[in-house]
Structures are given as C-alpha cells and as structure tokens.
Amino acid sequence: GAVVSQHPSWVICKSGTSVKIECRSLDFQATTMFWYRQFPKQSLMLMATSNEGSKATYEQGVEKDKFLINHASLTLSTLTVTSAHPEDSSFYICSARIIQGALSTDTQYFGPGTRLTVL
Amino acid sequence: GENVEQHPSTLSVQEGDSAVIKCTYSDSASNYFPWYKQELGKGPQLIIDIRSNVGEKKDQRIAVTLNKTAKHFSLHITETQPEDSAVYFCAAAHGGGADGLTFGKGTHLIIQP
C-alpha cells in the first residue's frame, strides 16, 4: 500500500511553454499533498501544500502565479509550471499524506518524481 | 522557521559494519522526524520515522533515536549491505507529520564490499 505515482516521469519543454505534472495516490485518499523541488545533488525543498477543495499554501519565495496547484480530488493533485524558463529545470516530487486505511496516519509517502528540463 | 542540520555529508563503511547518521533541528515545536532513502533518479522512500512521544524505534536493521532536550535524532543501520548504498535524508515537521517536511542536506552512504 501507500503508492504515489507521478506523470510524466520526465519532460523536456521549450522556454515560455507550460508543463503540467500529475500526482496520484493509488491506494489511499489524501486530503493533503505536498510539492517539493530538488536541484541536482541538493536536498528537497517544500514548495507548497495542496489541500483538496481549497487553495494551495505556498512557501515563502515560491511564486504562486508561476507554480499553479490544483487538488481537485482526494487522489489527484497537479502542478503546472507556467512560462517555464531554464532556471525552472529541476526534479519535482510530490508526497501524499495518508488519512485513512491500514497504514499509519500522518505519514508522507513520496512519488517517483518528475525531471523537468527547460531548453 | 525550522532548520535541520545533517552530518556527515558522506559516509563510507565496510559491508557488515554499522552506519550512524546524525541530525539536529532548531524548532522545539517539531514533533515528527522521518528518515528517507533516495536512490539516484528516484523519489525518497520512507524507511523509518519517530514521533516526539518516544525516544527510540527499531525496525530490523534500522533504528532511530530521538533526544528532545538536545534536539537531535540519529539513524542507525546495522549489518550494512551493498543495497544500503544511497542518499539518506532526515526531516522534521510540526503537527505529527501533517505539515510539510524540512529536510536535512542528505548523507551519501557508501557500503564498501
């Protein structure tokens, strides 16, 4: 149990275009999902908290108009990088917080990540 | 906000020996401390976590200890195996795990055969 998927696993886009990344909890419902960014050989940095049915909460320094988050259902959150630029190239990873089921509550399970390269 | 320091950045041990990774946190309100293992190009995998109401937790070859007074926690891996080689991250959060995680900078664990 506690499987989180992301799609796509990698994407290459041109500067100025928008890219959507999906995060799904496959075998549990998640009212809360989180989005992190990881640059090469660095740690994970929390970007935003995504709550089902409400607006996302962004960390200081993260542009909400650039990184659009939608959490339309208990199993899906999407991150759209708008007007992407080369400096947005990074590894984007989501996590989902378990709220019910046989596994422990209040535990975050991570997806496999999405590698974004902006040319 | 929370700040998590992790040491060492690289740790090389002989197969079969033990490995210890240490983290300190700054926010006394943090009460949830997970450890993740990340292999190259993959997402982090939860290996063990501890909450502030206990001082130690063990799962087979892996154990975590927490000292709330000193605000530090450690990961212990015994009888290391080649498949233990990876980057390990400690993290801290409020709300018993309900909030976003603040990560340490990671430890690259290398198991020498």
Image: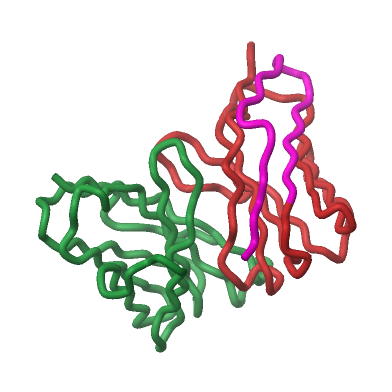
List x then y, in percent, for residue B70.
87, 52
* Quadrant into which the N terminus of chain A falls: bottom right
Q: Vertical placement of A22 versus A15: above or below?
A: below
- Start and end of the magenta stretch? B1-24
Question: Residue A98 lies in what quarter of the image?
Answer: bottom right
Q: Residue at x 56, y 31 (%)?
A: B86
Question: Residue B75 lies in what quarter of the image?
Answer: top right
Residue sitting nearer the eye, A89 or B40: A89
Looking at the image, residue A47 sits to the left or right of residue A105; the answer is: left
Q: Residue at x 18, y 48 (%)?
A: A118
Residue sitting nearer the eye, B38 or B59: B38
SS assignment for the magenta stretch, majority: strand
Most extreme residue toward the bottom, as rendered? A53
Chain identifier, green in the render? A
Q: Residue at x 45, y 36 (%)?
A: A41
List x then y, in percent, for residue B81.
67, 23
